[in-house]
Amino acid sequence: MFCIKCGKEDEELFEGLCSSCFIAGNKLITIPPELTVEICAHCSSVHVGDKWMKNELSEEEFIAETIAKESIPDKEAEDVILKIDLLNQKGSVLEILINARGKILGIPVEREFPVRVKINRNDCPECSKYASGYYESVLQLRADKRVLTDEEIKIADRIIAKLLEKLFRTNRMAYISQRAELKEGVDYYFGSYKASRKISHALKEEMGGTLGESPRLMGRDKSAGKDLYRIWISLRLPSFQEGDFLAYADNLGQVTDLNGRKIMVLDLKTLGKISLSWREYSHLDVVAQKENVKTTTVTSKSPTQIQVLHPETYQPVDLDILPELASLNIGDSVEVIEIKGKLYIIPPKSPKKFDPEKK
Ligand SMILES: [Zn+2]
Ligand SMILES: [Zn+2]
């Protein structure tokens, strides 16, 4: 037997060839000389097969990965390693040299392949929605029976911006396509319903209030065979703010704190702390606001009574003393609130204890 190419005799043959002729004719890998990759012009999404996908790789890494996927090792090849070098770039066309090393019949082999990679930059579906101002959901921020304060709008804007930045990392639709400041509040248009829902809950958690949701049918997506809805979410902040005064059942109290779970109240008659749930919201009436608090002076004190001057009439008013008022002395300034003709003392905030451990 002899090699059909070089005629060498007394050698083991592979498909009719001696080993050196067999190796010489082996390409190690097959790779198309021209490749196209499609990358979003605005984000890092890539088009692979018939799908746009999120992509964590850099552009160079994605191209290298595409080349590796398109390189098919020969069935005789072993231990194939590719080295990819960019030789030249003209606009969106990259000229790349692939150096492939491996073994054929156990013998090291090296091959080179020039490949042209064309980069197509298009809009991924999410970026084209963003560009067209598309939105899935509108969050309406309102206040109950009053207008939003500038401070509340500022706080909401800050919470929304911070959360969007975080959500956008994994959800390209977590954007605001429009923000409209109206007489009655602020409307935020969100690309993603999921994001707007998360954000509305975060706002409620921080600012309290009541949440509502109403889907509206916008039409039908014929290609997907689905009804298209947009969701209106309303967050209604409470009629009161921290420092305001509420009547609840037969009690009166000052709101000391509020969040998404509860409303903390200082009861004006007992000076005890009470926590109210948002379920009770409809039974809470605002009876005075923090702006109505006045300052006056303690004029007399006994074990059971404390006397202050009425802040407007300057008439002495005798009130029952409670343990929370024990630190007050004659001549001290004290905050009072008048509700339905009756005066209540707001106990002084207990002075912060000095803690030598805390720097
Ligand atoms: Zn031969
Ligand atoms: Zn994109």
Image (spheres, rainbow, N blue to C red):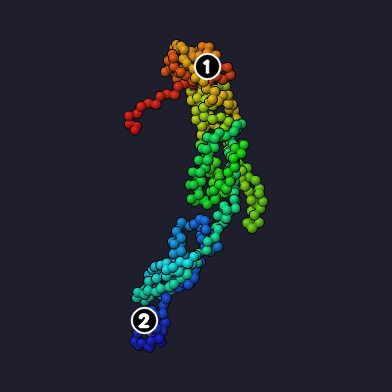
- Name the secondary structure under disc 2: helix
Numbered disc total: 2
In terms of depth relative to the viewer, which is nearer, 57 or 130?
130
Residue 356 visible (yes or no)? yes
Disc 2 crowd, CA 10 A, few/some/many (<14, 14-19, 20+): some
Query: On residue 20, which mark appears?
Result: 2
Q: Quadrant of the N terminus?
A: bottom left
**Residue lying furthest left in this view?**
356
Disc 1 crowd, CA 10 A, few/some/many (<14, 14-19, 20+): some
Determine which quarter of the picture holds residue 11: bottom left
**Where is residue 344 shown, x and y percent of the image?**
52, 18
Q: Residue at x 51, y 57 (%)?
A: 45
In the image, residue 151 above or below residue 9: above
Q: Residue at x 50, y 30 (%)?
A: 257
**Where is residue 176 shown, x and y percent of the image?**
56, 47
Q: Nearer the viewer, mark 2 or mark 1?
A: 1
Q: Amino acid at mark 1?
A: Pro
In the image, residue 236 above or below residue 35: above
Q: Amino acid at mark 2?
A: Ser
In the image, residue 53 above or below residue 11: above
For the residue with label 2, is its CB less than 8 Å from the closest atom of ligand 1? yes
The residue to which callout 1 is attached is 311
- Name the secondary structure under disc 1: loop
For the residue with label 1, is its CB less than 8 Å from the closest atom of ligand 2? no
